[in-house]
Amino acid sequence: MVSAFRVGESASALSSWAVDSREDMSTDSKPSTILIVDDDEEIRYSLGRVLGSRGYLIEDAGSGEEGIEKIKSGLNPDLVMMDIRMGGISGIETLQHMRSANSNLQIVLMTAFGTAQTAIEAMKFGAYDYIMKPFDVDKVIDIAARAISSTRDLKSADQYEKKVNYEDYKEGIVGNSPAMQEVFKVIGQVAASDATVLVTGESGTGKELIAKSIYQHSLRASGPFTAINCAAIPDNLIESELFGHEKGSFTGATAQRVGRFEQCDRGTIFLDEIGDMALTTQTKILRVLQEGEIQRVGGQETIKVDVRIIAATNKDLEKMVEEKTFREDLYYRLNVFRIRVPALSQRREDIPEIVDFMLQNLVKERKARATRVSADALAALSAYSWPGNVRELGNVVYHSAVVAQGEVILVKDLPEELRQATAESIGAPAAEESAGEAMAKAEAPVIGSLEADTPASPRSDGAQLPASLPALYDRLYSELRERQELRILSLIERQMIERAIAETSGNQARAAEILGITRNTLKKRLDELAG
């Protein structure tokens, strides 16, 4: 029989390795359980020895039917590792039955046949991942650790409670932060008037939602509302779009066209990205504001319009006025009331409510099945910088809800670039900067190249240290004595903790395991470092 593990690693060798590599797995919670389902007894035994050596409790089943029966009988493993091709029902069929019995199961499929169909079906039916035979031992251990971390992440969602009543936020503006409360106050003050409003803020902050809210609470709410993106319409067409044109006024004008201002009479028009509007068009907008009248392109007739204008931009209009790229008189006519919409990074406390609202909206539109988000995933979303603001958050939530294997969005479901960026941002920025500055001041690196043939040194407990460590200790101690201002010990501890946190995408349980400490100890160290 060909071993399912990497060539040259027999089951007996793996068993020996497993015993030799046993680590202290003490944690503040009970050991995780792994169910191994395979009709090959040698594989079940070998996998059990390898994973059991890492502190996991092992259950096994020789067929898909037996595995299903164990789940139905009450076994609730943190991970199922299962072969795809077995005697009896297949691994894919077994996966479907198991997920029907327990939708929260994390299942890793194992196969020697890595076809496109296999990969697609495995992920389609909710597998956490799949791995190829022969196995790479380190990869098996890594996937198991990540899958079990996702199970813990999943369990945190059991305490998830809806943070908003969807019906209370039909306008789409969600948030109770002080910054948004100020926005709501100004909307309330200006809505009932006919005053022109200028909405400013970064791209993606929801300026159009603000404009719609003003309209919906205004005396013109029964009239039309139209939104124009000035940046999306070419300069040679925007006047026709806004003011209309007469037949034959330019090539292609085969009929008279009524513009948006006429269509929006007694209503509200929203001019988004007005900072991108050409100066010639700005002049005509100024006329609408001053005189309440327009002329169609190619026409001579003056047409009276009764339209309230709300404008928005992510550009610095004051600077544009100074540079003569935006009319000063138009700027002052637009800026009667100013509403500054805060960036999402300035109101992070609103992120849980926004995410909850977005998920409810996706469910109502039947675009995704995820209805909840785990605590760790929500923490990652809250820690991200969001350069694209609420629009970017909406895209991430949609992506994650589609990728999620069940009703809960886990950390692993978030886009990889977000997980990486969040992991890199963990820790106090000021402390990171001071550590970097301190290292830069050193005349030579604290850790340099070491001789590979340095003999190994015994530890006090009888185990052998890696050959390079004694020389490393000498070098570090020398630096510690000569450069006490570097605070070498705390610097090393910070670097090791931050690297473990980054490597595990912020998963503290897994990071603690790598560092060889309990999760409670890690939390205490993180609090101390943050302080």
Image (cartoon, rainbow, N blue to C red):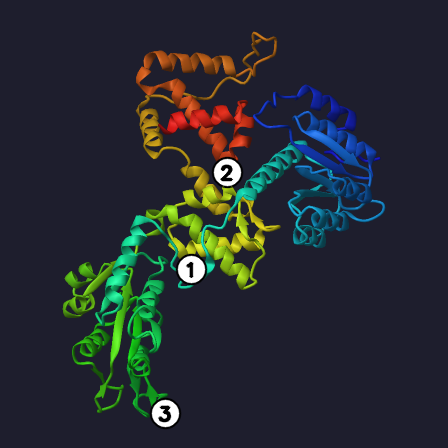
- At label 1, which amino acid type do we have? Asp
* Circle 3 Cα neighbour tier, 10 Å, few/some/many (<14 / 14–19 / ≥20): few
For the residue pair 307 and 218, the one nearer the viewer reads as 218
Name the N-terminal-most of marks 1 and 3: 1
What amino acid is at disc 3?
Answer: Ala
Q: Which residue is mark 1?
A: 168
Left or right side of 187 for 58? right
Q: CA distance from mark 3 to mark 2?
A: 60 Å
Which residue does the image show at 46% across and 46% down from the upper left? 418
Tell me: residue 510, above or below residue 192.
above
Labels 2 and 1: the sequence-earlier one: 1
Q: Nearer the viewer, residue 103 or 55?
A: 103
Q: CA distance from mark 2 to mark 1?
A: 35 Å
Q: Position of residue 90 (x, y in %)?
A: 79, 48
Q: Is 255 above or below relative to 331?
A: below
Q: Is residue 356 left or right of residue 129?
A: left
Question: What number is the disc on residue 255?
Answer: 3
**What amino acid does circle 2 point to?**
Ser
In the picture shown, does residue 2 fall above or below 321?
A: above
